[in-house]
Amino acid sequence: MATPNQALAHNGRLKLAALGLSVFLWVLVQTEPSNQETFASVPVLVQVADTSWTPSGAPNPSVVEVRLGGPAREIIRLAREGASLRVPIGAVGSQDTLVALRREWVELGQRSRVTVESLTPSSIRISFEEAETRLVPVAPRLIGRVPDPLALASPIEVSPQMVRIRGPRSRVEGLDSLRLGAFDLSDLSRSGTFLVRLDTTGLLGSSVVPASATLGVQVEDRIERVLDGIPVELDSGSDELGVLAYPPTLQVRLTGARTLVRSVDPQRLRAWVPSGDLDGMAPGEERIVFIRLDGFPGLVTAVSDTDRVTVRRRTDAPSPSAGTER
């Protein structure tokens, strides 16, 4: 069994080298050059614990100048990551409050060797307003068009459909919805679920939970289908009035997602003329009227070979009042 002296002597050179390296690193850290740096635009964040109140806007000023001291290496890292000053408000005493700033409110992360030497200005002014909390619907904002050869196969689904917003009453109580950031359909290349942040522009002092929503998008190949011989339907009383349409049938071209286009039943596809367009027609009178199309899904586009037809009332058509006894 080795004696204490023998154990100490074992690998003695290696142990001495390790000790020397430790001393060198300690001296290096202790002698690391100290530096002072001024961060000119550190944002001020206000955190209110009193749930009855919320800031009505940004504090004045909304940024401060912070002078830091400490090892140059840590200050450089902090400059890259960004610093902030978080002002905690436990209870609101008045709607307009002057708050003296404290150095410990500057968030430095785990950098215990960096110190806050000064804050400019030394105080800020915060205006408060009574808070209101509401549930409001989420409204998607779609731009662009699904690129060929794709088409939407179902309505875009938003989840969640409602979000909770808490903020100044003057801003929150009039909201009927919260819009998502713009989602560009022209960037789509596949079906999927896409995360989009809510647009909180103009809602300073408000918090929204959740802060984003997902859009469920289903796309398929875009196809075309041509249906011939779709009859033009007139008002149900047009036969009695002797009103006819020229041409009597149309060709309709359907465009959209494969499943939707193929699901269209030609027997349910209607080309029709509103009854009001036939009112007061005299015998022999002709009119050019617009037709309407329905009986197909909303995401399918239907276009007929003509958007209007000629309607004519026969000259021998009976008067609507003919045969009426007095």
Image (cartoon, rainbow, N blue to C red):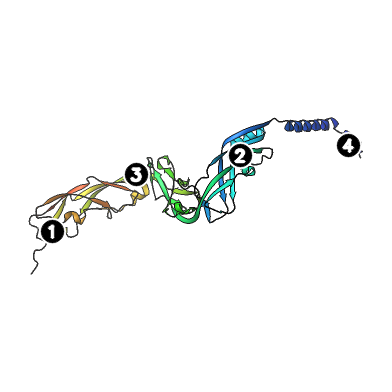
Mark 3 and mark 4: Cα distance apart in space: 85 Å
Mark 4 and mark 2: Cα distance apart in space: 56 Å
Q: Quadrant of residue 11?
A: top right
Mark 1 and mark 4: Cα distance apart in space: 121 Å
Q: Which residue is mark 3?
A: 223
Q: Is residue 238 visible?
A: yes
Identify the element where label 3 is drawn.
strand
Res 241 label: 1
Q: Nearer the viewer, mark 1 or mark 2?
A: 2
Q: Which residue is mark 4?
A: 7
- 172 is higher (above) or lower (below) than 145: below
The residue lying toward the viewer, choosing from 230 and 82, is 82
Identify the element where label 2 is drawn.
strand
Q: Quadrant of the N terminus?
A: top right
- Expressed as whole percent of the image width and height from the top left, the position of residue 56 reads 49, 49
Q: Would residue 270 appear left or right of 126 to someone viewing this image? A: left
